Amino acid sequence: MASTIYLHWTATHDGWIRPGHYHSIVTGDGQVHRLHAYDVDLPAHTWRRNTDSVALAVACMGGMPDPWTQAPSPLQLSSLCQEAASLARHFGWGAEAITLQRVMTHAEAAANRDGRTLHDNYGPVSWGGTGERWDLLQLHRDGPLDGGDQLRDQIRRHLTMVSGPEPKDRLQFRGFTEIKVRGRRLKVQLDEHGRSWAPATHLLDRYLIPYRWDEASQRILVQTVDVVPTFREDAVQRSLGWPVFEVSIQSAAAPVLLVGILRQDMDLKAWCRVLEFAEEFGISVQFDPFVLGERRGG
């Protein structure tokens, strides 16, 4: 379990998504793109604080020469706080645990506002620093210098609310049908929008992809070296109303391939969208009828 969540902005345009820098990035449409599993350490998001920590970032502040021409939107900040609250809930933190010591902006960390690590102050000039990092010091142009306090307040509010939408607002599932996967029939279920879902393990088994379920982090770890994550814009989000799980490559950085939902009402609980699985694992697809063929190049 991480000891600290660090909140950043990327100093880019609002569609910027790159792995290796942050665990998750919130783009301008409010989508949370999970790029790395939350239980792995990334090397360079917050100086001298990269171990035992999670980095969440908002894609914004890339305006030149004025960064505020691409300011963080209220939608992005709301998604950032919801993701931080969900992560805190996973760690077993209540609202009272959302303190400066547990959740910090990069501005606060750079200025060593928690007193944890004695290092040169590379934070905001207004806090006696060199001004190299001032992420989320302010949440809008000419705003007060209390961005961290405002974000922590939002996260606490999310933690004191009922987790997720009411069950009636959840993505609903309809009847079952069958599709062909590698020439054999596979039972899938359709959601209210007509999209096909299947147990992720059934799909992995059909393509002989080795994996293991990590109960502690709610992840399926796959053992493959020929998959490059696409970080799709339409990735499954918590807003569907179901708890989510990740499918990650089993490696030091644990890049996230796709996100699915956990269904306690089914014998096999980890379900993913069939088309998204095919796209991430390089599987040929035909439509009308919906058929999954072989993996491209294998």
Image: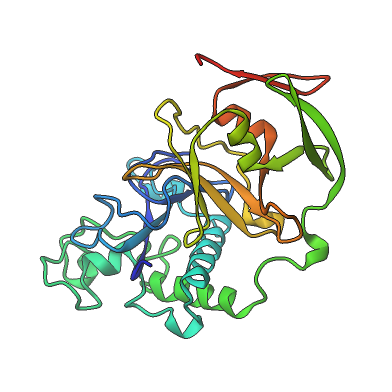
Q: How is the image coloured?
A: rainbow
Give the left or right position of residue 153, taking residue 178 as reference. Answer: left
Most extreme residue toward the right is 175
Residue 184 locus on image (x, y percent): 74, 23
Given residues 169 and 198, the one toward you in this image is: 198
Residue 21 locus on image (x, y percent): 33, 46
Residue at 72 percent across and 55 percent down: it is 267
Residue at 50 percent across and 32 percent down: it is 230
Residue at 82 percent across and 31 percent down: it is 178
Given residues 212 and 75, the one toward you in this image is: 212
Residue 260 locus on image (x, y percent): 62, 47
Quarter of the image for residue 252 reads top left
Given residues 48 and 263, the one toward you in this image is: 263
Q: Is residue 149 above or below residue 50?
A: below
Residue 294 locus on image (x, y percent): 61, 18
Give the left or right position of residue 48, taking residue 107 as reference. Answer: left
- Tally of numbered tags: 0
Q: Is residue 37 above or below residue 110?
A: above
Most extreme residue toward the bottom is 96
Quarter of the image for residue 135 reads bottom left
Quarter of the image for residue 200 reads top right
Residue at 49 percent across and 65 percent down: it is 87
Q: Quadrant of the N terminus?
A: bottom left
